[in-house]
Amino acid sequence: MKRLLITRTLPDANHAFAQSHFDTTLRSDVAGLTETEAAEALCNYDAILPTLGDAFTAKAFEMAGENLRCGVIANFGVGYNHINVDAAKAAGVKVSNTPDTVTDATADIGMTLILSACRRAGEGERIVRAGEWIGWGPTQMLGTHVTGKTVGIVGMGRIGQAVAHRCHYGFGMPVLYFNRSTKSVEMPARQVESLHDLMAQSDIVVVTVPASAETQKMIDAAALAAMKPTGIFVNIARGDVVDEEALIETLQERRIAGAGLDVYVKEPYVPEELRALENVVLLPHLGTAALEVREAMGQMALDNIMAWQAGKPLPQAV
């Protein structure tokens, strides 16, 4: 049997399937593989099922060198910026991800953050839990009314379109979007020419772009400065598409009304400056955290490994 490494604990159904088809090692450590550990895994296993935080860098492939054994890396998740795909391909290692399974769950978290940040839900819950609520009043914790507000989507892929669909059809929100290429969508929405135009025209901005060298820190200080003072910023993409320091400064100086974040630059580290702010809702990367979604992601990754084992093209090759 082929040797398979699963780098993080998956749902039981995924473990059972893997163990019935492969000589499977289940790694229980919650921390990702270091560069050295990734290199060792490349030398010791035929297939690897990694996820966010596992350092399959160019250096890891270089360290594996001629001892490399792995033929496929089937990533658990859509984002694969922790895998150097060019280095993998140069080493003859196929790479896949799990794109379709996460769309609705991630879009749902986007809506959770929109509503929570606009209506100051996190701040309100903290007041109640601390026993500091003094009772209802007409001007108590006034937030941003969501229905009818203009939403701007940065990156109109599957997840971006799912967020836009929820916003338009669920909350009557006009939809603008910025995409690096011209893109038509099957719903009422208008593409704008520049990121800064989108930031300036939107009441709520939601970032859904994949992480890449091109998108790193694309939401920089200048982009944030273009937002309305009443604007709400939401990130459900990857932490490094945003200049985190610039966002912290923007929120500290209340140049925008608030933010909702599910991702961070150096997860699981969340800067103290962010944690100290009342005008930001912080979630621990819950985008796909539903059992049926995680099971589907795991099975899709395993299906890609099965295809590789059978000598077939990977269904979700990247």
Image: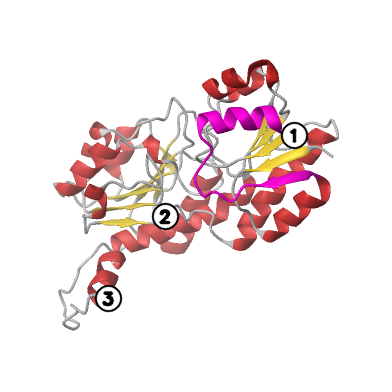
- Quadrant of the snapshot with the N terminus: top right
* Badge 2 amino acid: Pro
Does residue 133 appear in the picture of this structure? yes
Q: Is residue 140 left or right of residue 58?
A: left
Q: Nearer the viewer, mark 2 or mark 1?
A: 2
- The percent position of residue 204, horizontal first and vertical second, equals 32, 51
- The percent position of residue 30, horizontal first and vertical second, equals 51, 50
How far apart marks 2 and 1 lie (CA) works out to 31 Å
* Badge 3 amino acid: Arg
Q: Which residues are magenta?
A: 22-45
Judge by depth and name the residue closer to the eye, 151 or 253: 253
Name the residue: 16% across, 46% down.
255
According to the picture, the residue beneath numbered tag 3 turns out to be 129
> Label 1's element?
loop
According to the picture, the residue beneath numbered tag 1 turns out to be 314
How far apart marks 1 and 3 lie (CA) works out to 49 Å
* Badge 1 amino acid: Leu
> Label 3's element?
helix
